[in-house]
Image: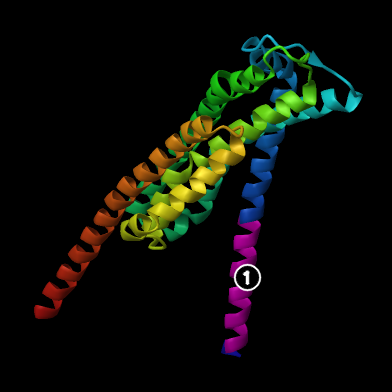
Amino acid sequence: MVKVESTEEKEMAYLDHFAELRKRLLWTALIFIIFFAVGLYFVQDIRDFFLNDTDLTLHLIAPGEIIWIIFTIAFIVGLTATLPFFCFQLWLFIRPGLTSTERKASLAYIPAIFILFLSGLVFGYYIFVHLILPFLLSLNDGMFETIFTVENYFRFVFRVTIPFAVLFEIPIITMFLTSLGIVTPKFLVKTRKYAYFILIIIGTMISPPDFFLQIIVAIPLIILYEISIVLSRIIYKKKMDKHEAYMQEDSNQEER
């Protein structure tokens, strides 16, 4: 009988956690819809912002292209603006299982995630406008008439900026994994050459087939990895110091 009650209590606990997670995801979805609508309202201003940095004349060859760009811009606005709220809701969900110190430390991740994501978008857009696009146009050298469609141009912009926004989260992800004990600074240093190789491959996927541009794109990613190692060492040292202090305190209690 006790076992039955224990099983029922566990099932109720799981259902409560699931209901709590569902509630927070619904709130996140609602905020996303709100910012998605905001993106739709300001889509013309955002589109003009992208086009102000280029003298290209974009051509519309299918009605579906304009619909695609409108909803894509609105989606990115909604995703970016909802990101900190989603992280906060996730923090609220796991907060009961954290200590007071862990709550304060993990809460600081939220603004950092948002700032790094925005920084990645800005950096990716800067790389696209000032390096990648001019390089591609220079290859033409006036031999052919350059025609860009709306969908192709903006798809290319997002193909460069979005990966940078995601990759700029590497330091935060590394700090979080270090705090969980999944990775260590020693492991990051040991796998550095493999990480460099992967980041260079990513740089070649984002940038045009030009060695100089690929190196320029890969350098900030490598710097982010090195920053991640430094941050991982800081987190790891604090974790080890806390563990040693706990073991010392436990040893003193046993001696008493």
Residue 134, horizontal then vertical, whole percent:
60, 18
For this rendering, which residue is in front, 143 or 116?
Answer: 143
Residue 141, horizontal then vertical, whole percent:
67, 14
Magenta stretch secondary structure, dominant: helix
Mark 1, residues whose alpha carbon is within 10 Å: few (<14), some, or many (≥20)? few
Q: Amino acid at mark 1?
A: Met
What span is in magenta? 3-20
Q: Decide: is 227 above or below 58.
A: below
| Residue at which label 1 appears | 12
Is residue 21 in view from this perspective?
A: yes
For this rendering, which residue is in front, 153 or 5?
Answer: 153
For this rendering, which residue is in front, 63 or 5?
Answer: 63
Disc 1 secondary structure class: helix
In this rendering, would 72 be left or right of 179? Answer: right
Identify the residue shown where x is 45% and y is 55%. 194
In this rendering, would 208 be left or right of 235? Answer: right
Is residue 88 in view from this perspective?
A: no
Quadrant location of the C terminus in the rendered image? bottom left
